[in-house]
Image: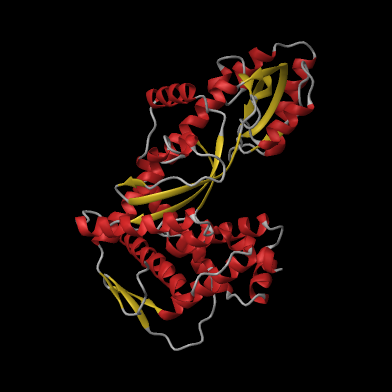
Amino acid sequence: MQRLLMGVLTLSWSMGCFAALSLDRIVAVVNDEVVLKSELDQRVHTVEDQLRAKGTPLPPTDILEQQLMERLIMQHLQLHLAEHSGIRVGDDTLNQALRRIADKNKLTLGQLRDVLEKDGYDFPAFRENIREEMIISQLHKREISDRVSVSEAEIDNFLTTQKKQGNQDIQYHLAHILVAVPEAASPEQVQAAKAKAEEILYQLQQGVDFQKTAITYSDGQQALQGGDLGWRRIGQLPTLFTNVVPKLKVGEISPLIRSSSGFHIVKLEDRRGEEQRVVTQTHVRHILIRTDELTSEQDIQQRLDQLRQRVLRGDDFAELARAHSDDKASALKGGDLGWVSPGQMPLRFEEIMSSLAPGEISRPFKTSFGWHVIQILERRQQDVTEEFNRNQARMEIRQRKIEEELEEWLRRIRDEAYVEYRLSVPQGS
């Protein structure tokens, strides 16, 4: 059951809901807000449980408190910005998110609550932590994601570079440590950060565990996950890593990499290739009738069934689609949707489409768009590697931009904030 709970709690490190029994006190002041000892204790409790469940060695408590204190400070700053921006997450939206978490773990919402409470977690506090994570996610979307765009020229350049490097089909599993420097850092601050990073790198080269070192010393967003960046293609990496990572051998650790954020160390955990993309495409056409207040669903089904019978008696499907379909874009083409690849249509549409042979026409069925009758024209095996690579490139460029801009934005709001520590937390070495 503990393993299941850890799976539920992977949404964020901040979802712990341990009820602190000690008397509350202020451990930090962030602008005009405070961070309480109970908040810090519940984060420590939750993260320690997560690390134990993964079999990861626990860092000293004071080091863990330091890491989590910084994350609490960043959480307070972002929630404050969100509140002033009018970002809210209502109960209906929150309940939908909780149901998705329960569904993912094959539980009902009631069962999820029982599992959490059985393992000592307070469900109302759990709900509010989920709400805060959703608010911060919306803030990131508004401040960063919605402002990032990718041009066709960027995709062309990206693919050209990949082709020259000969590694477009390779993915890298990376771990990462960041020793941060503040914005507009003094030469003394930069030198201190560099010295700390050099000492960390030396210890790693002597065989010290990378995961534990990341948990203890890294200022990166994935520090408490042991610095794990997961599997990434070259285009998903921060720009400053792209010339370093392909040259690393599996298990090798990079030299120090300098950026405006600080000093980075990456380790190549593994690499893997990618197969050619060949899919079964279906050439399909349809007649769509949408529901409205004046027409019942039974009437729509009957109308579509009549149109189907006319096609079976020899009437031209294309002419009927032009005259009756509510999908005006395809109606102009006789209902033709062109060649459809897996994943392009709603699940119910694809299920019906896959069950039909070329030439067959379906009975009326419903999707989120309305009621359909479809006819399969033909099928083919199609190499969509080029299309896939362009879509993949677009996503990777976009994700890289988002991560780089988010890192800069977080560093900026942290540097601009007033923070006063009331808990003696060592600053690391």
Q: Residue at x 63, y 31 (%)?
A: 345
How far across and how far down the image is residue 257, in percent? 37, 45
Name above or below for residue 25 compared with residue 291: below
How far across and how far down the image is residue 128, in percent? 49, 68
Does the rendering let one see residue 87? no
Q: Is residue 400 left or right of residue 279?
A: left
Name above or below for residue 320 compared with residue 130: above
**Camera-nearest residue between 115 and 45:** 45
Q: How did the renderer colour the structure?
A: secondary structure
Q: In this view, does 45 lie to the left or right of 178?
A: right
Does the rendering let one see residue 197? yes
How far across and how far down the image is residue 300, in percent? 68, 32
Q: Residue at x 37, y 39 (%)?
A: 148
Q: In this view, does 243 lie to the left or right of 384?
A: left
Q: In which quarter of the image is the N terminus?
A: bottom right
How far across and how far down the image is residue 182, in percent? 27, 57
**Camera-nearest residue between 343 and 299:** 343
Residue at the extreme front of the image, as rendered: 206
How many callouts does the rendering have? Answer: 0
Q: Residue at x 42, y 22 (%)?
A: 156
Snapshot quadrant of residue 291: top right
**Camera-nearest residue between 325 and 161:** 161
Q: In which quarter of the image is the C terminus?
A: bottom left
Snapshot quadrant of residue 354: top right
Q: Residue at x 50, y 56 (%)?
A: 206
